[in-house]
Image: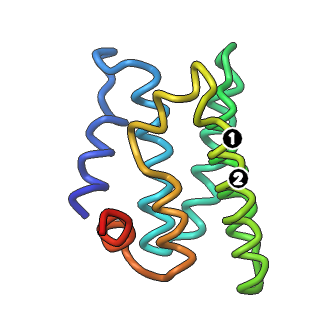
Amino acid sequence: DDALAYINRILNNETGEILLEIRIYARLLSIIIHFEIENIELVDYKVTSIKRFLKKRAKNNKFENIVIDFFRRIIKTRSKQETEDVIEKTRRDISALENVIGEIQVLNYFDYNSWLDSIKQKTTIGKVITDKLH
């Protein structure tokens, strides 16, 4: 609830004080939050909405497209194997961006690969990150 409230404060800020890049990643985090609380219908709607929003922008980052594609595909999976395949493809795609100038910064905002691991392991991202540190 708190995470969604903070993200919504960013998304509803109409003063223009928040950079476009931050707004985009807030939208992505909003989708993640709705996915986590299993609000799949809203995830589908928000994916469509962000795709429309990004089409208006001249510059499209590969990372944004990878995350959007992940959600578009994951909400349609029907088996554990399909889900794991989507997660692994997304992990590979994100990992391929780790040394790409212009894509690196976003990977500092949120640990997407740990989040993907948490989905696969059916645990929290906090536990995944803690386990990686030990």
Residue picked out by circle 2: 92
Element type at mark 1 = loop
Pick the front one: 63 or 50: 63
Instruction: Answer left or right for 79 relative to 22.
Output: right
Q: Nearer the viewer, residue 95 or 11?
A: 95
Q: Quadrant location of residue 124?
A: bottom left
The three-letter code of the residue at mark 1 reads: Ala
Is 3 above or below relative to 88? above
In the rendering, at what x and y percent does residue 128 appear? 39, 70
Give me the disc on residue 96: 1
Image location of residue 10, percent across then percent down:
30, 35
Q: Badge 2 local density, few (<14 within 10 Å), some, or many (20+)?
A: few
- The percent coordinates of residue 3 (x first, y second) are 27, 55
Query: How many numbered tags mark residues here?
Result: 2
Tell me the residue at 43%/49% (across/down).
29
Q: Residue at x 41, y 60 (%)?
A: 33
Q: Are marks 2 and 1 in contact (CB under 8 Å)?
A: yes
